Image (cartoon, rainbow, N blue to C red):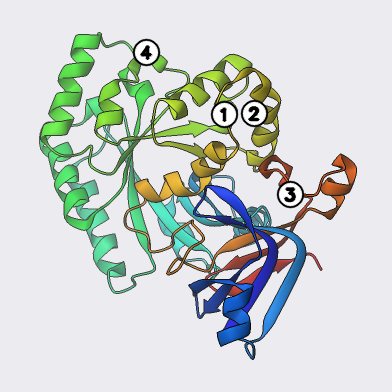
Amino acid sequence: MIILSPKWIYLDNKSLASDKSVLLDGGKIANVLSENDINKNFSRVKRIYYKNHIMMPSFTDTYINFDDCASSFQYEQKIKNILHNGVTKLQIVTKDYKKLLKLKHDDHMDISFMITLDGCKCTQTDINNMIKTLDFYKSNPNQLFNINIINIIKFDNQVIEKVASIANEIHFNIHIHLNDLIGLTHKEIETKIKYFDDINILNNCAVHDAIMNRDYVFEYFNKKNISICVKYCELNTFENINYFISLIKDGYNCILISDKEKSFRFYDLIKITDILNKNIETFDANKIINCVTENTERYLSNSSHKNILNKGAAASFNLYDQSKKLLLNNQYKPKLVYIDNESLTNVWSSGKEVYGKY
């Protein structure tokens, strides 16, 4: 067991608490302790202090493209760069996921792979090959898969119904792209969505391209708890950022994803939204942070790695040194918008420090 004592902890993804510590037991958070708890019951347990740091849950990227990794070295470097930005859980999408499966994976990263099925060419043979892959890895509980569906309206009904059946049986998460609905009337879209709902393919579902296809975002998605995946590259104008924030305020479960981005742009986004904060009532930074932490957990129901700091959760978190930020801003308590890659000094995943600047 070990105790970590930062200056501030982002508890329950709601607010910064001071004078709290976390007790780690293996890969889990055994408890969140007060100073009195430590003195009374855990005074002999090894303790590490982070005197000027914010502790936050580590991040998740639920859709990141790895087609640019032609070698094991490129793969390892990309994983390393992702980890050094505080991301410890990711879903990889690539044209050749079987190739990446053969590579050595970082034991401290929670990695799952997206199996892409294209409605323009997917056949029963493709489904059978997918089943063989799943059977091969079913004895490994740490190797998770999910489904990325493109050209969904082009699927043969029997094939898409088989996909839905498999997804529900194994509790797969499914990604669907709204671009596939372009050209259909609203009535045609409603008919398609009703059919998808009837075959239960919208269970544990996330949709893409909502910012660029906002006419296709229905209140229905909110009622069905369908997650909205938002690419950082879509948030390239104030108009799009404001629309993104409006989705969050309306209760949609929004998730930020990198897709084909070469760098992790979360820290840039949180600073931009802070600038906009002056014109957005009732906005606070934790709503953006939730898009890479808590909101991802509502979608990734088949993962045991929870992005929240409380008792029983995975001991996966980031530590940000705030000493320079507080000095520059002449403040005694940090703001959540102060976190960035520069101040990120330590990353822990499942109870082990996997990155440290010092």
Mark 1 vs mark 3, foreground winner is: 1
Mark 1 vs mark 4, foreground winner is: 1
Amino acid marked by disc 2: Thr
Amino acid marked by disc 3: Asn
Contact between marks 4 and 2 (CB within 8 A): the answer is no
State the quadrant of the C terminus. bottom right
Contact between marks 2 and 3 (CB within 8 A): the answer is no
Q: Secondary structure at mark 3?
A: loop
User: Which residue does the numbered mark 1 point to in the structure image?
Assistant: 283
Q: Secondary structure at mark 4?
A: helix
Mark 1 vs mark 2, foreground winner is: 1
User: Which residue does the numbered mark 4 point to in the structure image?
Assistant: 215
Precedes in sequence: disc 1 or disc 3: 1
User: Which residue does the numbered mark 3 point to in the structure image?
Assistant: 341
User: Which residue does the numbered mark 2 point to in the structure image?
Assistant: 273
As measured in the structure, the alpha-carbon distance from the residue carrying label 3 to the one carrying label 4 is 35 Å
Contact between marks 1 and 2 (CB within 8 A): the answer is yes
Mark 4 vs mark 2, foreground winner is: 2
State the quadrant of the N terminus. bottom right
Precedes in sequence: disc 4 or disc 2: 4
Precedes in sequence: disc 3 or disc 4: 4
Give the residue drawn at x 27%, y 69%: 138
Q: Secondary structure at mark 2?
A: helix
